[in-house]
C-alpha cells in the first residue's frame, strides 16, 4: 500500500524535474489517484477479517440455540404470518426513514440524487456498519457511496457527520425520557440510573460542541503560515485544516436551516431508531411476553452499544448474551432465545441480504469504477 503510493509520488517528482530550470515542486496526489493506490491493499485487508466476520455471524445463530435448545425454531413457527408482516413493516420503515434523511441532506448540499440511489447508499452503509469491527466500515462506506452520488469529499464527510450527530441528539433526548417512563414502574433502579447518567454525559458533550462552535470554526478556518520548505507533518496538518474548514463551510447551511428542515431530520432519525428497536419489543409481544417498550428500548441501547466495543462484527454474540441476562428476571432464557433468532433475522440477516444487493446495484450504476473525478476542494 505504502509502496504503491510512494511509486506514484516518485513518478510525479520525476515528471516535474525533467526540466532543469523548474523548481523541485512535488505534485499533490488527487483523491482518485490516492484511492487507486490504496484500493487493492484495502480490499485485501478486509479479506483478512473474513474469519472474524464469519465467527461473529455464526455466534449470533449458535448462542440462541444453545440457550433455547431444539424448541427454538418450533416456537418461532407459532407466530402467525401477520406478525412477521408487521416485523417486516417495522424494518422497512427504518430503512426508508434513514434513506430519506440522507436524501434530504444531499439535496441541502445541492447534490440532487434520485431517492432510489439514496436508499441504496443507506442500505450499503448499513451493511458495512453491521459486518465490520466496531462498525468503522460504515463511515468509510457512507463517504465512498455519497461521493459516487456526486458529493465532494468534504460534502460526503459532512453528510456522514450530520447523520451520526442527529443520532446522538435523538439518543440524548429519548434515553432519559425512556428512563423516566420506567421510574416508579417497579423496574430495577440501576437501569434508570445508568440510562440517565449516559444521557447526561451525551447531552453535556453536545452542549459543549454547540457552545464552542464559533471557536472551533475560527480554529479551522484561520490560515496558518508555513515556512518556505514546510515539513511533511506541517503539510499534512495544513491539508487537514483545509479539509475541515471545507467541512465547516458545508455544515453551516445545514445547522442554520429553517426549523422545518431540522424537524424533518430529527423526526426521521426518531422514526428510524424507534422502528428498529421496536422489532425486538414486538417479537416478544408476539411470543406472549408483554414487556415494557421503554425497558426493551433502554436494554437494546445499552447492550448493542456495548457489543460494538467488542471489536467483533455483529457483536460476536455479545448482544444475545447481554439481552438474555438483562431480561432473565422477566423472561426465561429459553423463551428469549426464540425472540433473539427472529430479531436477528429481521434486523441483521435481512440487512446483510438487501445491503449486498444494494452494493451490486450501485456498482453497476457507476460502471464498476466507483471513484468520481474530484473537484478542486478534494485535492489532498
Image (cartoon, rainbow, N blue to C red):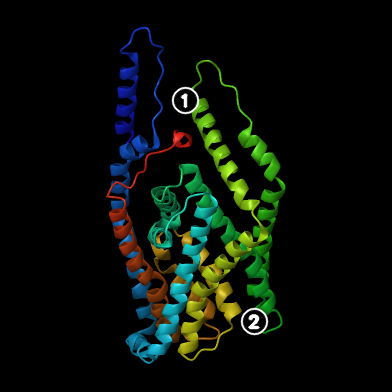
Q: Is residue 363 left or right of residue 321?
A: left
Q: What residue is at 55 percent from the left and 71 percent from the top?
A: 271
Q: Position of residue 153 (x, y in %)?
A: 46, 43
Q: Is residue 204 left or right of residue 15?
A: right
Above or below, 210 against 323 in this view is: above
Label whose residue precedes the other's in the sequence (1 or 2): 2
Q: Position of residue 292 (x, y in %)?
A: 59, 83
Give me the disc on residue 187: 2
Front in this rendered view, residue 86 or 172: 86
Q: Position of residue 265 (x, y in %)?
A: 58, 62
Front in this rendered view, residue 224 or 321: 224
Q: Is residue 134 left or right of residue 169?
A: left
Q: CA distance from mark 1 to mark 2?
A: 57 Å
Q: Secondary structure at mark 2?
A: loop
Quadrant in which the N terminus appears: top left
Which residue in the rendered view is the most extreme toward the top?
A: 21
Q: Residue at label 1?
A: 232
Picture mark count: 2
Q: Quadrant of residue 342?
A: bottom left
Q: Secondary structure at mark 1?
A: helix
Amino acid at each position: 500500500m505504502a509502496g504503491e503510493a510512494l511509486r506514484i509520488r516518485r513518478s510525479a517528482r520525476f515528471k516535474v524535474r525533467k526540466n532543469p530550470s523548474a523548481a523541485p515542486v512535488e505534485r499533490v496526489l488527487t483523491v482518485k489517484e490516492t484511492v487507486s493506490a490504496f484500493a487493492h491493499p484495502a480490499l485485501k485487508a478486509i479479506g483478512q477479517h473474513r474469519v472474524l466476520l464469519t465467527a461473529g455471524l455464526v455466534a449470533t445463530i449458535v448462542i440462541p440455540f444453545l440457550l433455547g435448545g431444539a424448541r427454538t425454531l418450533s416456537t418461532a413457527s407459532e407466530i402467525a404470518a401477520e406478525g412477521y408482516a408487521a416485523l417486516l413493516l417495522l424494518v422497512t420503515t427504518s430503512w426508508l426513514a434513514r434513506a430519506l434523511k440522507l436524501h434530504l441532506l444531499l439535496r441541502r448540499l445541492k447534490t440532487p440524487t434520485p431517492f432510489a440511489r439514496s436508499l441504496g447508499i443507506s442500505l450499503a452503509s448499513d451493511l458495512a456498519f453491521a459486518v465490520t469491527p466496531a462498525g468503522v466500515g460504515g463511515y468509510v462506506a457512507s463517504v465512498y457511496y455519497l461521493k459516487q452520488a456526486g458529493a465532494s469529499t468534504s460534502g460526503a464527510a459532512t453528510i456522514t457527520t450530520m447523520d451520526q450527530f442527529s443520532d446522538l441528539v435523538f439518543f440524548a433526548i429519548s434515553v432519559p425520557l425512556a428512563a423516566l417512563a420506567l421510574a416508579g414502574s417497579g423496574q430495577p433502579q440501576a437501569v434508570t440510573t445508568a440510562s440517565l447518567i449516559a444521557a447526561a454525559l451525551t447531552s453535556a458533550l453536545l452542549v459543549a460542541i454547540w457552545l464552542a462552535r464559533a471557536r472551533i470554526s475560527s480554529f479551522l478556518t484561520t490560515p496558518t503560515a508555513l515556512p518556505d520548505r514546510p515539513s511533511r507533518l506541517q503539510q499534512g496538518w495544513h491539508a487537514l485544516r483545509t479539509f475541515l474548514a471545507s467541512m465547516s463551510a458545508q455544515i453551516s447551511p445545514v445547522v442554520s436551516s429553517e426549523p422545518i428542515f431540522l424537524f424533518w431530520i430529527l423526526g426521521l432519525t426518531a422514526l428510524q431508531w424507534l422502528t428498529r428497536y421496536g422489532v425486538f419489543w414486538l417479537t416478544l409481544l408476539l411470543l406472549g411476553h408483554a414487556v415494557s417498550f421503554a425497558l426493551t428500548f433502554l436494554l437494546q441501547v445499552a447492550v448493542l452499544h456495548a457489543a460494538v466495543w467488542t471489536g467483533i462484527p455483529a457483536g460476536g454474540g455479545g448482544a444475545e448474551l447481554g439481552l438474555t441476562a438483562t431480561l432473565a428476571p422477566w423472561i426465561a432464557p429459553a423463551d428469549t432465545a426464540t425472540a433473539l433468532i427472529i430479531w436477528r433475522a429481521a434486523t441483521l440477516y435481512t440487512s446483510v441480504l438487501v445491503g449486498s444487493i444494494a452494493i451490486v446495484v450501485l456498482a453497476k450504476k457507476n460502471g464498476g469504477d466507483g471513484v468520481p473525478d474530484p473537484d478542486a476542494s478534494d485535492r489532498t
